[in-house]
């Protein structure tokens, strides 16, 4: 349950005002820190002044209060994996992956009235007004169906859909003006795609269609359990679903090693099926999107708003990239990466060499024909160190291809979960059949 309430700012003017105050607070903090460092005999660097604990708290607190696209974009960027942002900023934004504030009851009643009419309370049996989860776009409440089944109602915050475009533009401007994002980088194509993706996530009827598609594809697989849409409780901004029991997926770490490995292998297998068979991937890596039933061993799959369909041309290019990485063929890696839309920089440049090194390193768990020990791996720190080397080549930085950014977001999330569970998985063996297809 979450008792932390905070009104959702709705109008564009109020939300813009939040960004302006955030920028002013960051600037004031930079001045204060700069003076402190000068008095201590240090020569302050703008990057160090920006990435202070005070600014980290200021940024994450403000985005959590705003919710919507501002918080969601922060979550997306926090899972960047080195393609796009300085590691320090990604670490700051990682705090946004925890639960957000709930909306006050007046706003809750407003949304429910819009969805079901003024007598909504008569239609919602045993409705618990206290949400048990609150995230970037909406919050989740327990209730019963008319026939007595346990159910949940996912309720969108008011004004979220209307603020997507302005939120994304304002946050991107803030990051560029602050210097945390290279000023020359053309992020317009990425922002267009992010806005479109967020519009889909804010359309709960679209999420219901995605959920139904996954039910059709996986409903007979007894290793998984998925909620079912309740049409009578579903509108564009409210989504009714059957309740799926289970404990947080992180609790699997308390199981025996064999079970930890089995569960994580199952999730890697699911991702490969999504990517190369369905070409429909649930791209949100949040751990809360999985639950685990210790009695049955089933993994529950939740929250399909961030699902993304991929064109066959992209999945072919990405398959070629994985095939080249497995073969350690740098020429083929470069060819496949460029076919997927990556900009690798000038031929024979140090920048290009670092990018290719990073591609091989990031996908390391997929290249070794042995159980990869995620719990003992130093992969994250090695990638972060290599990302620091790229800081010297900011003039070459380009926004990553959008489809690849979403895939990497999912892969990074799986690697993080495998690390949390201390799992050992031969991802290479799971991947090989798809590369041979």
Image (spheres, rainbow, N blue to C red):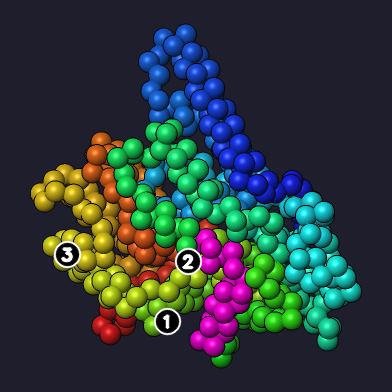
Q: Which residues are magenta?
A: 197-217
Q: Is residue 28 above or below residue 104?
A: above
Residue name at image x 59 percent, y 31 percent: 21
Q: Is residue 111 above or below residue 369?
A: above
Q: Position of residue 75 (x, y in %)?
A: 52, 52
Is residue 43 visible from the viewing direction of this image?
A: yes
Left or right of 396, for residue 90: right
Q: From the image, tell me which residue sits under label 1.
A: 278
Q: From the image, tell me which residue sits under label 2.
A: 283
Left or right of 409, for residue 225: right
Task: Indicate which disc residue 437 carries.
Answer: none
| Lower sequence index among marks 2 and 1 | 1
Task: Indicate which disc residue 335 carries.
Answer: 3
Left or right of 166, for residue 6: right
**Main SS class of the magenta portion in the image:** helix
Q: Position of residue 159 (x, y in %)?
A: 66, 55
- Quadrant in the picture for residue 436: bottom left
């Amino acid at each position: 349950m979450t008792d932390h309430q905070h009104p959702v700012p709705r109008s564009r003017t109020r939300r813009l005002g939040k960004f302006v105050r955030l920028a002013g607070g960051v600037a004031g903090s930079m001045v204060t820190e700069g003076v402190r460092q000068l008095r201590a005999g240090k020569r302050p660097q703008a990057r160090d002044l920006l990435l202070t604990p005070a600014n980290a708290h200021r940024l994450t607190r403000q985005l959590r209060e705003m919710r919507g696209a501002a918080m969601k974009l922060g979550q997306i960027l926090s899972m960047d994996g080195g393609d796009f942002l300085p590691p320090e900023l990604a670490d700051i934004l990682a705090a946004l992956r925890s639960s957000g504030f709930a909306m006050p009851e007046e706003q809750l009643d407003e949304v429910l009235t819009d969805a079901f009419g003024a007598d909504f309370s008569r239609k919602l049996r045993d409705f618990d007004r206290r949400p048990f989860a609150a995230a970037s776009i909406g919050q989740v409440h327990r209730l019963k169906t008319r026939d007595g089944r346990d159910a949940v109602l996912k309720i969108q915050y008011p004004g979220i859909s209307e603020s997507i475009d302005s939120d994304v533009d304002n946050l991107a401007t803030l990051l560029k003006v602050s210097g945390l994002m290279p000023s020359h980088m053309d992020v317009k194509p990425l922002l267009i795609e992010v806005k479109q993706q967020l519009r889909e996530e804010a359309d709960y009827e679209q999420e219901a269609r995605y959920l139904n598609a996954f039910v059709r594809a996986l409903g007979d697989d007894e290793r998984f359990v998925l909620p079912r849409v309740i049409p009578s409780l579903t509108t564009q901004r409210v989504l009714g679903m059957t309740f799926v029991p289970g404990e947080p997926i992180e609790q699997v770490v308390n199981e025996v090693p064999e079970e930890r490995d089995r569960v994580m292998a199952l999730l890697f297998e699911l991702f490969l099926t999504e990517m190369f068979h369905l070409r429909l991937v649930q791209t949100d890596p949040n751990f809360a999107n999985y639950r685990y039933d210790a009695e049955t061993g089933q993994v529950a799959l939740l929250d399909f708003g961030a699902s993304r369909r991929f064109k066959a041309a992209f999945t072919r290019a990405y398959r070629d990239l994985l095939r080249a990485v497995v073969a350690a063929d740098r020429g083929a890696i470069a060819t496949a990466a460029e076919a997927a839309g990556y900009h690798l920089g000038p031929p024979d440049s140090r920048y290009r060499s670092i990018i290719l090194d990073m591609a091989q390193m990031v996908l390391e768990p997929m290249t070794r024909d042995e159980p990869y020990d995620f719990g003992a791996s130093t992969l994250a720190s090695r990638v972060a160190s290599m990302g620091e080397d790229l800081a010297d080549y900011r003039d070459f930085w380009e926004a990553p291809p959008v489809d690849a950014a979403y895939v990497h977001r999912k892969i990074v999330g799986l690697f993080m979960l495998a690390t949390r569970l201390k799992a050992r998985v031969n991802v290479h063996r799971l991947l090989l059949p798809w590369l041979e297809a």
